[in-house]
Amino acid sequence: MLIWDGACHVHEEFSVERILELKKEYPNAKVIAHPECQKPVLIIADHIGSTSSLLKFTVQDDAKEYIIATESGIIHQMKKKNPDKLFIPAPPKDSTCACNDCQYMKLISLKKIYFTLKYELPEINMDADVIKNAVNPIKRMLDISEKLGI
């Protein structure tokens, strides 16, 4: 059996070297990272967690500066909940900007959502067994999140 170890292009592209350069510039900044990041990034992280865990950490933690190693869209929520704190997106390995965003998440637009809701298209048909079996991992994920208080 061949098993794909799955990956997210956003989390694979963070540069430890560039994060460490940012740490020199912001020595008090804590590095917080999504668990899908590469191991070297996780090793230097002060906190590792899901997107909601990262957000919660910035609210409860006393630090005033954070280097964020996940999709930069969460930074808006962090700023809303912590207007007095500084959030710095972790840079990717090769980029002219200091951000690392998911190219696929940006394909969704309000116009596309509107037309999908209005015309109920595209219709997706799935085998009943697939639907039934898909519920189990979702329930497990929600149970784990509830136990962790996330």
Image (spheres, helix red, strand yellow):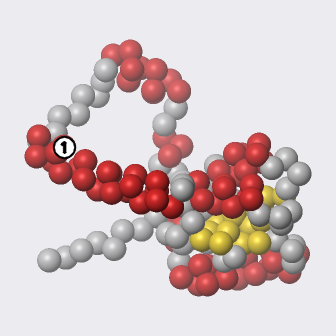
Q: Nearer the viewer, residue 8 or 77?
A: 77
| Residue 48 position within the rendered picture, expressed as x and y whole percent measured from the top left | 60, 71
Q: Quadrant of residue 28?
A: bottom right
Q: Residue furthest front?
A: 147
| Residue 139 position within the rendered picture, expressed as x and y whole percent measured from the top left | 32, 51
Q: In percent of the image, x 52 and y 70: which residue is there?
A: 35
- On the rendered structure, is 86 left or right of 11? right
User: Image quadrant for the N terminus?
Assistant: bottom left
Q: Residues within 10 Å of mark 1 (few under 14, many from 20)?
A: few
Label 1: element kind: helix
Q: How many marks?
A: 1
Q: Nearer the viewer, residue 117 or 48?
A: 48
Task: Return the residue at label 1.
Answer: 131
Q: Quadrant of residue 22?
A: bottom right
| Residue 69 position within the rendered picture, expressed as x and y whole percent measured from the top left | 64, 66
Q: Nearer the viewer, residue 7 or 131?
A: 131
| Residue 16 position within the rendered picture, expressed as x and y whole percent measured from the top left | 66, 80
- Residue 96 can be seen, yes or no: no
Q: Amino acid at mark 1?
A: Ile
Q: In percent of the image, x 25 and y 48: which residue is there?
A: 135
Q: Nearer the viewer, residue 36 or 55?
A: 55
Q: In percent of the image, x 11 and y 41: which residue is there?
A: 127
- On the rendered structure, is 64 left or right of 76? right
- On the rendered structure, is 141 left or right of 61? left
Q: In percent of the image, x 69 and y 76: which residue is there?
A: 46
Q: Is residue 114 above or below residue 129?
A: above
Q: Is residue 54 above or below residue 110?
A: below
- Residue 128 can be seen, yes or no: yes
User: Image quadrant for the C terminus?
Assistant: bottom right
Q: Is residue 81 above or below residue 71?
A: above
